[in-house]
Amino acid sequence: MRRGGHAEALLLRRRRGPARLWVAVLALLAGTLWLLSSSAGLGLGLARSSYGLQLDSQFKVLTLTSVLLLKDVDVNKLWRTADSNGWRASSAPRTYWPPPPIESESNGYLRVRCNGGLNQQRSAICNAVVAARIMNATLVLPELDTNSFWHDESGFLGIYDVLHFIKTLKYDVRIAMVIPEITTNGKTKKLKAHQIRPPRDAPVTWYTTVALEKMKKYGAIYLTPFSHRLAEDIDDPELQRLRCRVNYHALRFKPHIMKTSSEIVNKLRTEGHFMSIHLRFEMDMLAFAGCIDIFTPQEQKILIKYRKEHFAEKELIYRERRLIGKCPLTPEEVGLILRSMGFDNKTRIYLASGDLFGGKRFMKPFKAMFPRLENHSTVGPGKLEENTRGLAGSAVDYMVCLLSDIFIPTYDGPSNFANNLMGHRLYYGFRTTITPNRKALAPIFMDREEGRAARFEERVRQVMFNTHFGGPHKRVHPESFYTNSWPECFCQPNPRNRVDKCPPDNIYEVLESQFQSVEGEEDIEEVKSTNQTDSTSQIEELVV
């Protein structure tokens, strides 16, 4: 009986042996496959495939073996641009694109007042151009709301290169500096625009019906406020490409801003690579997020008061907000992330941020880890403007972050600066962007704060290397078109799908031939150079 039992147990162990071996092999294979996909992507940005396949599911089979192998990831590869997978930026029209109407054929004048910060207004300008195109209207140079937030009188003329803006878009919309005067019954007077408050995220049909009807009736309409007043999801890819032409080609900052930005970038590059960080740890964002428990009682009162004055009343529980990723990362958390990923204290960092709330005590741990910190005041050529918090200072920060080797937004929620920059860097050569997953990182940081710090850096790396780093990827709601204009504003010279094929090199000659009837014909060669979509060469020529 014992003998039989022994034989049966031996047989069972023999059967289990191969099974266990297969489990181990499969686990090792899964970890190896994950590592291969990660290391291949890390060298060029962990780009997702051209159809935006997600990598998240691969972490479900992440084994101890692959976790340990993460220690060997070469973080220096992140200084390179991401893998394009054969895609390049192209916002040129790919179908017949008629020229804008001559003055006598225009349906009227469109005037808009853009509100919000510099980058929210930037998106509004793009929307205004598209709206004018939709209505076959003449766009009056957009107005910037510079007083309510910035207390800055610069306006469009003081921030952007107006002549470049008009010339670059000459194939797309007719642009006027002001609404003209009209003569009726022998009397000359300025045409008065009929004011309308457009609905938020208005569909194209609103502009072709309600807005157009008023325009034809009054001759001009004034849309105010004009922030997020045109839906981002538009079925017509040509209108989406027009948005990109405005955003990435027509909107160029004034020469003195470009010069200052270039000087800062050149100084930062004298010793090699540098990264830029948008540290969103200001009073308005912290009050909006409701993340106040880490502050002193007096600081909490300030945040609560600010929230009551500026935002809708809502009960917000700090721990719950943090666990769902709604709290901005603290400077110390940003430093811990970078150190866990393998960046050392020699890393040169450009900091783009407003006044950090809570004083120097929040920056002290970060500076201890990464002492080589700069901003536009410390590395810039003297004073930028009398008010460095104004539009010019924000514009310089934008350009330096655009040209940095690595960009890290610490809070990509309601942050137009970070979201627009991610889209701009994607368009200009798939430049590396590291976007921390705050929701996935929150429990790791909370464990550390409560004394459970085992495998802290490994866990952080596991999260951080499970992201795309600026390569082409599918846009998934609520990701904005201004954050990711792939695939509409990209093309492939040798595509699998015909719709992705790059337009011919002579596309602007074709547009010029269609444009011959428009008054004020200008030299096509300069327009071709400003609209050229070879992203890598363009940005260096444009800025550096």
Image (cartoon, rainbow, N blue to C red):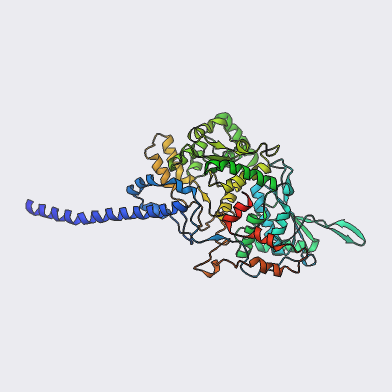
Q: Residue 185 lies in what quarter of the image?
A: bottom right
Q: Is residue 82 above or below residue 443?
A: below
Would residue 540 be seen by someone viewing this image from the given angle?
yes
Q: Nearer the viewer, residue 357 or 262?
A: 262
Tally of numbered tags? 0
* Residue 285 or residue 257, whichever sits in front: 257
> Residue at position x 49%, y 44% from top?
438
Q: Is residue 201 left or right of residue 214?
A: left
Residue 535 percent location from the top left of the image:
58, 56
Residue drawn at x 53%, y 33% is 362
* Residue sticking out furthest to the front: 270
Which corner quadrant of the image does residue 131 belong to?
Answer: bottom right
Residue 320 is situated, as x and y percent measured from the top left of the image, at 49, 42
Q: Residue at x 21, y 56 (%)?
A: 18
Position of 369 compared to 112: left or right? left
91 vs 378: above or below:
below
- Residue that extends furthest to the right in the rendered view of this protein: 186
Q: Position of residue 2 (x, y in %)?
A: 7, 51
**Residue 240 in the image, given as x and y percentages of width and height:** 62, 61
Dividing the picture into quadrants, the one containing residue 102 is: bottom right
Q: Is residue 79 above or below residue 308?
A: below
196 sits left or right of 303 in the view: right
Q: Does any portion of residue 414 appear in the rendered image?
A: no
